[in-house]
Amino acid sequence: MKTLLRRPFMYHGAIPVTLFGAMALLSVISLHIETGSLNPAVILDLATKTGTQSLLLTHGWTPRFLIALVAGAGLATAGALFQHTLKNPLASPSTLGLAGGGKLFLTLATLYVPSTLVVGDDIIALLGAITVGLLVFTLARRSGFSPLVVILTGMIVALYCGAVTTALAIIHHEWLKSLFIWGSGDLTQDGWYILGPLGLKVAVGLVIAITLARPLEMLNLSDHQASALGASPARLRMLCLLIGCWLSATIVAAVGIVGFVGLAGPAITRMLGIRRLRSKLGYSAAFGAMLLCAADQGIQVLSAHIGTLVPVGALTGIFGGPLLIILIRQLRANATPVRNTTSTQISNRSLLHIRSLLGLLVVLSLVAAIFIGRDVDGFWQFQWAGDLQTVWPWREARILGALVAGTMLAIAGTVLQRMTANPMASPESLGVSAGAAIGMIAVIFAIDAPSAWVQISGASIGAIATLIAIFALTRQSGYAPERILIAGIAVGALFDGFIAFLMAGGDPRAAKLLAWSSGSTYGLSFDRASILTIVAVAALPALPALARWLNLFPLGPMTAKSLGVDLSISRGLMLLFSAILTAAATLLAGPLSFAGLIAPHLARLAGFRHALSHTMGAAAIGAALMVSADWLGRILFFPWEIPAGLMAAIIAGPILVWLLMRIGRNGS
Amino acid sequence: MHKLAPSHSRRSFLRIATRASIFAGASCTFSALVSQPSLAETPKRIVIADGAISETALAMGIVPLAMADIPGYRAWVQEPKVPDQVINLGARFQPSMERVAQLEPDLILTSSFYANQYSKLQDLAPIEKIDIYSSSKTPFLNAIGAARKIGEVTGYPDAASKLVFETSEHIADASRSLSKARANSVLITSMLSPRHMRVFGKNSLMQDVIDQLPIRNAWAGPTNLWGFATVTIDQIAHYGDAAMIAIEPVPDNVERAIDHSPILSELPAIKRYGLITMPPVATFGGLYAAGRFARLLAHSLSNTNTGNAEPA
């Protein structure tokens, strides 16, 4: 591993200085707003007096300032630890799904056992985070905490928790108002009772991490090298993950979900070319603390001028997204790609069986979706003739939409995972779907009651603009996969920030958006479904042309290059191909369809290895998954609806975990 | 704290508008708002998408065949009660279209906010759009107009007049009892956590009702189209002379925090009056909610009231 600097350190030194300057300046302004003075004597006098203004200074402003530093430092350190262990510059405290677990537990407690909230929200959230952490650890232990398995299980568990939480939020929107604020990470304080315990816990985590930095450094070596030096890579990885989990779980429990700092802190550190783990941890902590504090102080300066709550967790996404995009130009992600080593060896004969099984699954899901529904009293019914005729106009477009979207997303996901050799790649990580969603948000908030077609136009413009931006930003690097994924994550963070901000403010339009943005075919018209189907089908013939590249790229870009592939052109075309499919699928079934992440993995685990058969297998799985998810989401809790994207995660998540476990047991 | 002069012009305007609509009758005052019913006979199978419209219709004695989010209505709106036979359509944002189609409605009532979901049903049944929260920002007048229009399209115009009359009576009663209230300015909140709340102001139905009462709403800050702002505890710390009213349900952790949170327990409003709670009122409600709010507000601020029970 070698970090190449494109510019001297002095140039990059401007970043920490700017960051510190911004934090200091904003803090001074917000202190002035709070106290009406900048004279230390006056402020000190105020702090020692009683009365509302003094109370707000000593029990509001001060602990808030400090908790931003503590949480920022802890999250960024956790991010650095995860990136180090998992050898992936995209890993962050959210990779392991701890925050998702906390949110799920809080949601369940609020809705079903509100009496348990007496013990305190933080305890419930911590329990959720710990449960998820234990689950991921149990699943990953067998593989010796191999980065691939940890990332995959973490992501699946995170998606699963997120899917259940969002499904509940759509149905019980009103009950979860306060949870939306927690979920968007507001740092307002009303005393020292949160900061005290949190400061202690984070300090313990930081001290342990920095003390153990030297032995943990060995994770930079290959497993063989580390073992030869007498270290146990599995144990080291577990230790490193444990410290990261400790930090992120305690922070999320205390202040709610503050994303992005855990990604940005280490990213800035990497840009500065810092290589030793101990320094990486220290610098990350410092950058994280300054970032979060600057953002939070900025909010306090602005809050007088904004009519609604701006939680810092949401804001870090909204500003952090573009920041990361700017940083991409200077960022040289040099992580070794995590190879998909967990594919199964399978004979051609059983592959044939699997192919027929998949075909059967697609047909079965279609039959179920078309004919099985609920009658007017809510009883399950095989619908035929008149019964079917009544509901058919509302069913046909959705089934077609789910079928096409599932297929397209699975194909796009397979292409992206092969091209980037990164198991975290999915159509969502391209940013196109988040771009579409941002376009949709803009239209919904700019226009009173926009029609469906206006909304779709907004989403299309958003998708196209994002695609152009991503091409422009990554062209110089020859469409390097890391850059594409980071750009995609940045757009995704921007979108998540918007949604979190809107949900926290409680605007009813946000709830409307939540339902669409969790992958729903609801309200899809047959015209729209047909047009997008034609677009998607027209793009398909390009697939065989890409097959050679798709076979070579998983072996690494160097191998492909030595065999005469023009990296820039091939990557650009593959990117364009998957982006078109993703955009079409997003307009059909919303921006969050887990089919695109899960189907390629399922297909690979089922034994499909060559590019074309892998893609086709994934396409069949994606189609069956989305059709059955849409069907179940429509009728399982009739008349309540669970969006297909969420249902797909709920169905396919456990299957994927089970397959991963099985392979782990076979000794991979 | 300085005291703002109550806006007399707005207040009397609302009063006059209410009375005018009672005595002048619907057809002249709100002829612009009311479209001619396109139905040959009185609709019997009515489907309602919007909470405020459901509430208004139920208060007029009109029982819909089906409405959206009944469990949510029972928890957050409560009154008037939804009879058991009313069928649930599912989430307000994504009602089950298959169920609506199966029910074969002959009239669909919705607000523009939810209208998109139903537009495909145009061939199935006439759709009437009724808006209370709109860019006109006069929810109380819109609520009267909504009741009138519901009466018109369902064939019960008298029920609308009765509801308008009852509401003005409730407001007049509340006005009388509030003239000797223990606080003369209020903050109407919906608590979310010990540090966060929604506070209601301009554009809200509550603001329009308070404008007709001898007290004032202390919150003059910006609000959204639905008449509320989500704020943090420090933003209301300086409203010393206002009584803080929390609409139920109040989260458990807020009640507990009043004892141990240094800022919450030291808030001037809470130190002086305590946290006054009020039974659930539809915060984005219709005309019935306006009357109910006036009644409950008067009760919670009356000098004799120490508990928080709903008036009999």
Image (tube, coloured by chain):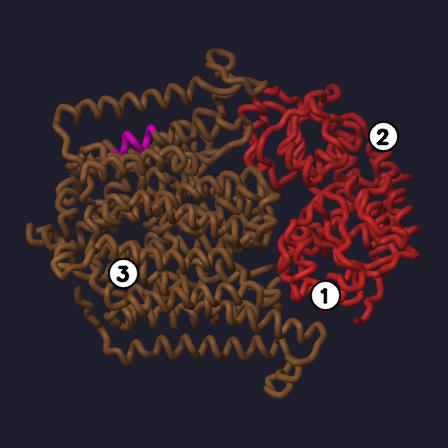
Per the rendering, the colour in which chain A appears is brown
- Which residue in the structure is indicated by mark 3? A84
User: Which image quarter is the C terminus of chain A in?
Assistant: top left
In the image, which is nearer the foreground, mark 3 or mark 2? 3
Q: Is residue A46 magenta?
A: no
Of callouts 2 and 1, the N-terminal one: 2
Along the viewing direction, whichever of B244 and B152 lies nearer the viewer: B244
Q: SS of the residue at dot 1?
A: loop
Q: Which mark is residue B267?
A: 1
Per the picture, the main secondary structure of the magenta-coloured stretch is helix
Compared with A551, A291 (above or below) is below
**Does residue A156 appear left or right of residue B154 in this picture?**
left
User: Which residue is depicted at the point 57% across and 73% down?
Assistant: A62
Magenta stretch?
Answer: A618-624
The kind of residue tagged 3 is His
Q: Is residue A619 magenta?
A: yes
Q: Which mark is residue A393?
A: none
